[in-house]
Image (cartoon, coloured by chain):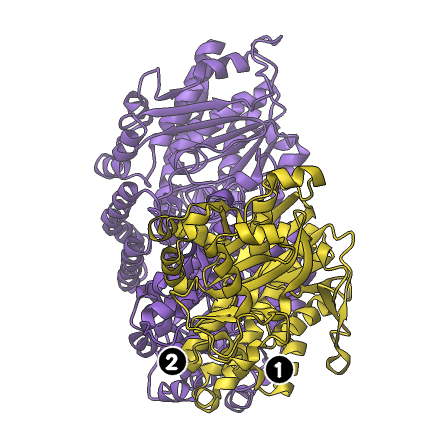
Chain colours: A purple, B yellow
Amino acid sequence: MAEFVRLDSSTSRHTMDKSITLPPDEIFRNLENAKRFAIDIGGSLTKLAYYSTVQHKVAKVRSFDKATKEAASDKLYEISVQEEVTARLHFIKFENAYIETCLDFIKDHLVNTETKVIKATGGGAHKFKELIERKLGLKVDKEDEMTCLIKGCNFVLRNIPHEAFVYAKHADSEFRFQTTQPDIFPYLLVNIGSGVSIVKVESEDKFERIGGSSIGGGTFWGLGALLTKTKRFDELLQLASKGQHTSVDMLVKDIYGGSYGSLGLTGDLIASSFGKSATADKEFSKEDMAKSLLHMISNDIGQLACLYAKLHNLSRVYFGGFFIRGHPVTMHTITYSINFFTKGEVQALFLRHEGYLGAIGAFLKGAEEDNPNQYSWGENYAGSSGLMSVSPDMNPMQRARSGTFDMLEMDRLERQLVNLPLLQDPSSYIPDTMDLTEDALAREYWLYCFEEALDGVVKRAVASQPDMPEAAERAEKFRQKYRHKLQTLRHQPFAYGSLTVRSLLDTREHCLNEFNFPDPYSKIKQNENDIALKYYQKAVKSLEELSWEERQFALVRGVLAGNVFDWGAKAVSDVLESDPEFGFEQAKRQLEERPWLVDCYDQWLERLKGPPHKCALFFVDNSGVDIILGVIPFIRELLSRGTEVVLASNSGPALNDVTNGELQILTERIAAMDPVIQAGLREDRLTLVQSGSSSPCLDLSRLDKVLAMVVRERQTDLVIIEGMGRAIHTNYYAMLSCESLKMAVIKNSWLADRLGGKLFSVVFKYEVPAGKPSQGSAAGTPS
Amino acid sequence: MAFNGHQREDEGIDEDETPTKQPRSEKEMPGCFKTEPHNEASGSAGRSTSERRTSNSTMRHRADSVKKTRPPFPWFGMDIGGTLVKLVYFEPKDITAEEEQEEVENLKSIRRYLTSNTAYGKTGIRDVHLELQDLTLCGRTGNLHFIRFPTHDLPAFLQMGRNKHFSSLHTTLCATGGGAYKFESDFRTMADLQLHKLDELDCLIRGVLYIDSVMSSGPSECYYFENPTDPDHCVQKPYTLENPYPLLLVNIGSGVSILAVYSESNYKRVTGTSLGGGTFLGLCCLLTGCSTFEEALEMASQGESTRVDKLVRDIYGGDYESFGNMMSKDKRESVSKEDLARATLVTITNNIGSITRMCALNENIERVVFVGNFLRVNTLSMKLLAYAMDYWSKGQLKALFLRHEGYFGAVGALLELLHPS
């Protein structure tokens, strides 16, 4: 919002090019189902928002009718691909020059006739009011800019992980993303448009403009134009980035000859902006003047922001407005200023989707009856352009002509997501173990890895839909899309927040869904589940024959061996594909012998000798052998000890991970042959919940609300996390407020190397939070 | 004739004429200085210093100890800022015949030269209207003179001191401001003078408190604007700075320093800003081609008053953007130099007002004293500041001003000479 509208009339006219043709498939997607519109028109950019529905193919599993089961097939459940309608928010950002073309396009493609109004905000809204009403036949309903801005800001802070970042020009990674805070309030929003508005936000509906300044982006632009005869804002910034302010500014050392030691003011500090230009007989370069002006304005805004933050005792200060919008130059100078004035106590925070706040807010205003804030939303990586999709370093003229359309898509999630109540400190929880944005070597490896695996994924995607002739074509589109994402991430690893193995996996899932490959592994999973079930009773029987202590070890080895079965890991999928006989016993032999790479088994065993846990929450991993022969026997033992068990599985498919739908059927089948499981289900001591996620990794700060409720109700005192995706790529360092067990087999030699182990090294990490002594060997007698 | 190395003789002024008799006002001598005459305030880039610093100044010594510690004449205090050098000179008027006899020729000629002229060279000015007469200092009675010249003319000043063997007087030259450090070696090599360097903020506060205390008899040193939000009834009124603590002291020179003063010896630098008098003049020179502070102010004063009134009313409302209109090409072409000068002045002044107000809130201080040479002959800025303090605090904050605007650092340096801490 609030971009400057009093543009040079000449610049806005000459770029008005109505002959452009839009690539519609890629920009105004799902327009035919769009039902609510909002628009935010700033001084140079227009942001359009609409709500639409997306029809997806989703894989559903359904248990065969008991009566017809024998006859129908020897498979244990049925897979059907169904159409599902989900809600999605589309946001598109484009240069004002395209506004007419875009409106025409929308008009031609808009089918929904219920839509009567379009919410509008931004300084340019009234200027284009007539045009919008004429073109679209919608009534323009103007909304207050500040209200929209704050609403949008709250929305992105709450729903988009890694929305906020700290900018550090000279660091390995310029962008340091912040984890989502459990409570986003209170915060200060400093909007640097033409002037500066400083807004204190205390809750969803409570905010107040506590201050402002007339020295803002307009001052830089206007004064800069006067001083340098350069008209465009971007060009001024370019000039500034090449200048030397020291020839224009009077520094402390110009006055003192050095530093002003007793006050700790170093010689390089600016004592007086433009202090050296107070002379009639000297020429100054445009670059130097622009730089001096940039410093002057940035420092001034930073200082005011700090004074307000201090007065209101706020430590989170977000900066936005066209002065900031994606410009590394201004993000740097503002950051510098904040660091200087607060001595690092306050960090300047910026937002990835800052440019969309007004449009998001205006949209939310219009959608209040749908109560959008009761849902959780997720950024769709497949449909979103990512940060800096248009390089700000690009020549401003090129930029204006490139007509780049920036997009953001948010999916409405079926489940409301919350923190796991057992996180020790939700505000410092970081799911990901490795930040590939900062670790260039790791980034290189994983990007390569995902690129290498792409052929296989495409092949399996095609194979998963043998009845659909166009599957190959779609799969090819998927390949292009995902490869393009990988290439983008190679150059802009910060595009979607911190780059992590999880985000790479999630992006792949989003891209697969985009091209209607909802569950490429459905048949493989079905098959593996089938085979594994046949061995279940035998496996349980052989475990029961062991002594208590032998059994405990065998159970752990079972989970670990089961975890070797993983199509997500290249090392394993190769073996699985080439050697279908690769069995459970072989997997056990592959396992590293104790002592393992991380080996807390002795402590775990001691703990088992103590009193049973009240309730264990188990985040499961793969289908087939893993869940059926590894996990179920393990939790069967827990149930026998008197521990309640909550099995958490994915809500939607990801790789060969077992989904909640599949697990429902599997446990039913197992219950039919195992009285322990049956009793557990019947007595409600064994519960199945969905995690709310469709990722092979696990973010404990975004879990299904129901799961959190169950965890709380059952007084869960043990969390078990299994598998590489959930216990190593993520959560390896997660600190929980109760006992936790992280089990995984490292099925990637590079990662094994990193962790100091080798392929098939075992991580068995049992942790008891500080202050809660392990109850091991207390009084309990082994059962 | 001493000090004649750098000045033109100010013909037309009788050397014997008492300087207090109808002195030339500076307005009668336009162009006798070259660059903008406002104050330094060096370390204005504003890191706030949390620790309070204690100045060890003890202002009044017992009378009997005074004579023993009294330094020999001449008595100078100097403040060398980024833009201007401020010099205060104590002229003893109680010289006995015996003293007169003993007085060396050099000393005598310095006294005559300084007191009989009001302009020195092309750029030196004595602010006659600020002169303090019949002042008792260290047991001596005399007049305190206030002189300024641009810092870039310091070499000429030093050359003159060398030519006239100033060093033979064996006086201690107390100097503050950044230039005391920057030019220390120049003083030594060019004029054989050893500077006694003093902290500028210590000197500033000492000077403010001293001048205010000795001005109780004459015209009030401190004043404020009554009805600051009503342009038609806004008038200057004297103010008594008794019991002044805590106060916020805002020194607007080239840059700005903001100090919270809790007692004579207890203060801290809260913050500062680089947007100060130097910025006003620097930008005005670039935008209008002017070259002096007076020129710039003159242009600013010719801006349309209704427009400025509007600015004052709207500025904090957020609808107004400094120089925002200049994004438009048409408006850029139609704007006058006077308007630009005025916009610059208003922008800088209001920004200082805004930062000051926030500091006052953060420090919980209700009295603000503005000093520094940016305010010299700058009623427009003073009224803007008075307006801003009053309006945005709903009358809680009071903006105070001091007549000796930019000279307090130099006065503080002189006091250090007489009463070393």
**Residue depicted at 28% across the width and 60% down the height:** A484
Q: Which of the numbered marks, if any, corresponds to residue B308?
A: 1
For mark 1, give the secondary structure: helix
| Nearer to us in this view, A71 or A665 | A665
Q: A41 above or below B4?
A: below
| Nearer to us in this view, A451 or A281 | A281
For mark 2, give the secondary structure: loop
Residue A463 x %, y % = 29, 52
Residue that badge 2 annotates? A231
Q: How many marks?
A: 2
Residue type at tag 2: Lys
**Residue depicted at 39% across the width and 85% down the height:** A11
- Mark 1 crowd level (few <14, some 14–19, many ≥20, 10 Å Cα): some
| Nearer to us in this view, B409 or B272 | B409
Q: Chain of mark 1?
A: B
Q: B347 above or below A184?
A: below
Q: A364 above or below B230?
A: above
**Residue depicted at 37% across the width and 72% down the height:** A236
Q: A341 above or below A240?
A: above
Q: Which of the numbered marks, if any, corresponds to residue B251?
A: none
> How far apart are the two marked residues, 1 and 2, measured between alpha carbons?
26 Å
Circles 1 and 2 on the same chain = no
Q: Is residue A614 left or right of residue A533?
A: right
Q: Chain of mark 2?
A: A
Residue A380 x %, y % = 44, 59
Residue type at tag 1: Val
Res B220 quadrant in image: bottom right
Does the rendering let one see residue A368? yes
Observer-side mark, 1 or 2, equals 1
- Mark 2 crowd level (few <14, some 14–19, many ≥20, 10 Å Cα): many
